[in-house]
């Protein structure tokens, strides 16, 4: 899953506390690797990492796990709460279970892979990262998403892509209802190629890009038009 060469170390959250563990991770050098024991749903685990380290969270994580991540690879061996990988800049975050609301919110770079389902507002206000959800996503996902990609192998709840800008959304299952200014768009070769690459990066090998439909902005909300039909941005 990770290509980072690491040396292993175990940090026990019961012994070191959240601040102690996060301080160690934030000061770690590239190439180091850590397993975090006893996460017990604590908030802000592995937040603010800036080096190419690998972190395995051995259990469930609470709110804002791996927030503001830069370069690190974080794997959660359980579920994650609200705001997973919020404002991620680069690196990769994998959740082997499901994620709460607003996973990947405002994320600007990197790859977030959720192996289960994601709750409401997944990829809200996305700003360049790629989010792959192997299960389904809740309502208002990709709300006001500006750029980046959201890939959903399952179903999408109502309000998908409401007020969306230029993020591309790929859904393999059903869509409850499209949000304002979100429309289905044709899947051209460039989209099939892009989606196939995203699926490969996420480690998804059991589906075909041709199984998905693409959604994006109709450009009627943020793209102002003169009354005479002339366009102005």
Image (spheres, rainbow, N blue to C red):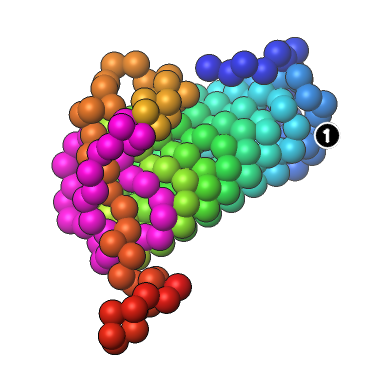
In this view, 137 is above or below 145:
above
Which residue is at a point 16% across and 42% down the rendered structure image? 174
The span picked out in magenta is 164-192
Residue 90 visible within the image: yes
Left or right: residue 171 compared with residue 147: left
The one of 122 and 44 positioned closer to us in this rendering = 122
Q: Position of residue 125 (x, y in %)?
A: 46, 58
Q: Residue at x 37, y 28 (%)?
A: 193
Instruction: State the residue in front, 35 or 165.
Output: 165
Instruction: Name which residue lies at 59% across and 18% down.
Output: 2
Residue 165 painted magenta: yes
170 part of magenta stretch: yes
Point out residue 37 in the picture as x, y percentages from the top left corner: 62, 24
> In the rendering, at what x and y percent does residue 104 appear?
49, 46
Residue sitting farthest toward the bottom: 227
- The picture places residue 79, in percent across and down from the top left corner, at 44, 34
- Residue 152 visible from this viewpoint: no
């Amino acid at each position: 899953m990770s290509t980072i060469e690491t040396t292993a170390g175990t940090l026990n959250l019961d012994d070191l506390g959240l601040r102690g563990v996060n301080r160690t991770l934030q000061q770690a050098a590239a190439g180091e690797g850590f397993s975090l024991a006893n996460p017990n749903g604590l908030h802000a685990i592995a937040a603010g990492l800036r080096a190419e380290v690998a972190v395995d969270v051995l259990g469930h994580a609470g709110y804002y796990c791996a927030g503001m991540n830069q370069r690190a690879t974080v794997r959660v061996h359980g579920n994650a709460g609200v705001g997973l990988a919020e404002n991620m800049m680069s690196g990769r975050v994998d959740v082997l279970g499901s994620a709460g609301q607003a996973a990947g919110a405002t994320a600007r770079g990197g790859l977030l892979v959720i192996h289960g389902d994601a709750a409401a507002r997944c990829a809200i206000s996305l700003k360049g990262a790629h989010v792959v959800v192997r299960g389904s996503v809740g309502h208002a996902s990709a709300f006001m998403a500006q750029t980046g990609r959201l890939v959903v192998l399952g179903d999408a709840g109502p309000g998908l892509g409401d007020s969306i800008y230029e993020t591309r959304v790929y859904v393999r299952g059903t869509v409850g209802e499209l949000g304002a200014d979100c429309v289905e768009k044709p899947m051209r070769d460039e989209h099939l190629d892009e989606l196939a690459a995203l699926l490969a990066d996420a480690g998804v090998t059991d589906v075909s890009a041709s199984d998905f439909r693409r959604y994006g902005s109709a450009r009627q909300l943020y793209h102002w038009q003169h009354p005479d039909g002339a366009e102005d941005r």
